[in-house]
Image (cartoon, grey):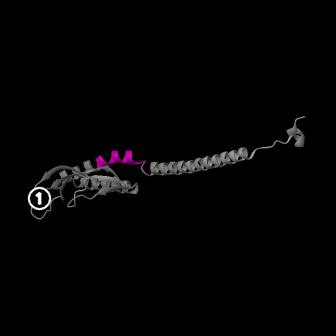
Amino acid sequence: MSEEEEGHPDGVEIVEEDEVEQLKKKVSELEKELQYQAADMANLRQKSAKERSESIRYGSSSLSRKILPLLSGIERAINQTEGVDGDGFIEGAQMTLRGLRTALESEGVTHIEAMKKQFDPTKMEAVAMLPAPEGVEAGFVMEVIEEGYMLHERVLIASKVIVAE
């Protein structure tokens, strides 16, 4: 037997202090890495939950985009038949219009108020700029060509407007 083996019965090895320090350092690095991985997983769960929530909240935007042009069509039909012997049609169309608006509002769709408001490029699209008539300030909406709508905080359809310059 060698001297080392004789001094240490039962096959116990002597581990040098440098090796112990290296092992401690490696354990410390692995613990840090584990903490980073746990933090990454927590962030991923939060991001996934947020995306799922937004998916649910904005899921009806496709349907809303299809229905909104119908609102404009019904409004045009009502405006063109006023004064004509179409009272039944007008009443039915107005009821339909109210029903559609109520249904869309219950889904979070709201009308963008643009008439006589300051032009807002995040919600409105200027189709023309005309000289401001008396009493109208520059930069304000003079006429709404096509109504705009939002789903919660997102613009579905921008209002098409004429702006005073």
Q: Measuring from the top left, give residue 65's x and y in whole percent.
A: 34, 46
Q: Relative to the observer, which residue lies in front, 71 or 87?
A: 71
Q: Residue at x 26, y 50 (%)?
A: 72
Q: Measuring from the top left, give residue 47's x and y in whole percent.
A: 50, 49
Q: Residue at x 65, y 49 (%)?
A: 28
Q: Which residues are magenta?
A: 59-70
Secondary structure state at the residue bearing disc 1: loop
- Badge 1: residue crowd in 10 Å (few <14, some 14–19, many ≥20): some
Q: Relative to the observer, which residue lies in front, 50 or 10?
A: 10
| Residue 49 in view | yes
- Identify the residue at the far top of this view: 1
Where 66 falls versus 98 (above or below)?
above
79 left or right of 63 in image: left
Q: Residue at x 29, y 47 (%)?
A: 69
Q: Residue 63 magenta-drawn?
A: yes
| Residue 85 in view | no
Q: Relative to the observer, which residue lies in front, 36 or 147?
A: 36
Q: Locate the C terminus by quadrant.
A: bottom left
Q: Quadrant of residue 115?
A: bottom left
Q: Quadrant of residue 119?
A: bottom left
Q: Measuring from the top left, give residue 102's x and y in whole percent.
A: 36, 57
By secondary structure, the bulk of the magenta-drawn segment is best described as helix
- Identify the residue at the far front of this view: 3
- In the rendered image, which residue does mark 1 sit on? 132
Q: Residue at x 30, y 56 (%)?
A: 111
12 left or right of 122 in image: right
Indicate the amino acid at tag 1. Answer: Ala
